[in-house]
Image (cartoon, rainbow, N blue to C red):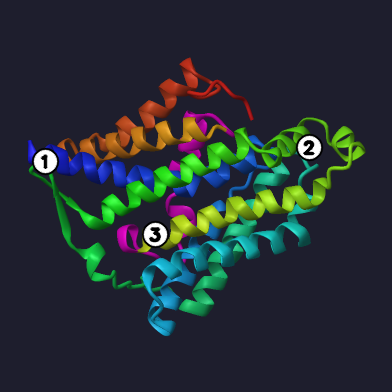
């Protein structure tokens, strides 16, 4: 029983990492209608910010996380304002090719600056231990990932569904000309939203270093599963992304642990079935 609980706990923690990675992609794809396949590059950026600050500046772990978020968000805003803003109106294929090229460029730049090797990170003692809950031992770091993912999801749902900012985003996407006519600065709004999505990816990247590792191939290792979370959850749906990320994380952990020969097949089979019977995802929303 403890063994199953431990595997499920690992799956939930992995799912929360997938949520942090993918929720920004869900925002840009579902709300801004931009196919950003370079999203993993922003996660990699946050990871390198975290490892650099840990190794060089020796900052506390809890200070490194907001630093990774803000630094990656700033990079996202700069890239959005300088190049990506001109891609919004392009056909989907051109958006895909552009963003894939951006991811390859980021990977090459990371190799030049940091080298091809894996980055090591030393977690603080309070995250390196275990916590016993109802007789079951859970890793402290995994519980921290779960809490971070849940808090992030709740904050985003409140932001996009119950604030003026979220209403402006939806209005700007649905009818840009009308939104500008009533005084909404759509360019600034899109830059802030894209920066938010990039910052969330950077936060996920910073949290993932101690769980998944980090190297210049990071933008491509998890791109497929991130797209799966968005597709299954429904583009632009935070709640759908939560359910999809947890589902994929737990299923992946259980099958890879107990039936490793068919683990990957089951996960991708789940995507195929979802696309057949729920083509708009669990939330029923189309991009």
Where is mark 2, residue-wise?
A: 172
Q: Quadrant of residue 176?
A: top right
Q: What stretch is highlighted in magenta?
A: 210-236
Is any part of residue 18 visible from this angle?
A: no
Residue 41 drawn at (x, y percent): 54, 59
Q: In which quarter of the image is residue 101?
A: bottom right
Nearest to N terminus: mark 1 or mark 2: 1
Where is mark 3, residue-wise?
A: 207
Q: What residue appears at the point 31 percent right and 58 percent down from the top-left corner?
A: 211
Q: Does the magenta stretch include residue 228?
A: yes
- Measured along the vertical axis of the image, is residue 254 above or below residue 13? above
Q: Distance between the residues labelled 2 and 3?
A: 32 Å
Q: In this view, does 187 lie to the left or right of 109?
A: right
- Graded by Cα atoms within 10 Å as few (under 14), some (14 to 19) or many (20 or more), the crowding at tag 3 reads many
Which-is-in-front pick, marks 1 and 3?
Answer: 1
Where is mark 1, residue-wise?
A: 134
Q: In which quarter of the image is residue 177?
A: top right
Q: Is residue 254 left or right of residue 137?
A: right
Kind of element beneath mark 2: helix
């Amino acid at each position: 029983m403890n063994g199953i609980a431990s595997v499920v706990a690992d799956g939930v923690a992995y799912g929360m990492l997938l949520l942090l990675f993918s929720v920004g992609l869900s925002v840009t794809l579902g709300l801004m209608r931009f196919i950003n396949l370079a999203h993993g590059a922003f996660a990699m950026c946050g990871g390198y910010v975290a490892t650099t600050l840990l190794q060089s500046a020796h900052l506390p772990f809890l200070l490194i996380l907001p630093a990774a978020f803000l630094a990656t968000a700033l990079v996202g805003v700069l890239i959005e304002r300088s190049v990506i803003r001109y891609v919004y109106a392009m056909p989907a294929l051109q958006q895909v090719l552009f963003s894939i090229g951006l991811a390859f460029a980021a990977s090459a730049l990371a190799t030049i600056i940091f080298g091809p090797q894996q980055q090591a990170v030393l977690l603080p003692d309070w995250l390196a231990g275990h916590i016993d809950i109802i007789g079951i031992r859970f890793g402290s770091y995994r519980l921290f990932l779960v809490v971070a993912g849940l808090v992030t999801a709740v904050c985003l749902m409140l932001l996009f569904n119950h604030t003026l900012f979220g209403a402006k985003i939806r209005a700007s996407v649905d009818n840009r000309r009308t939104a500008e006519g009533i005084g909404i600065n759509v360019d600034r709004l899109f830059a802030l939203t894209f920066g938010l999505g990039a910052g969330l990816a950077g936060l996920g990247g910073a949290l993932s270093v101690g769980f998944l590792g980090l190297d210049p191939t990071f933008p491509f290792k998890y791109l497929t599963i991130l797209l799966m979370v968005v597709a299954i959850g429904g583009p632009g749906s935070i709640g759908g992304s939560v359910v999809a990320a947890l589902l994929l994380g737990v299923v992946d952990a259980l099958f890879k642990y107990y039936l490793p020969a068919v683990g990957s097949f089951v996960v991708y089979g789940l995507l195929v079935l979802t696309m057949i019977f729920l083509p708009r995802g669990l939330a029923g929303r189309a991009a």
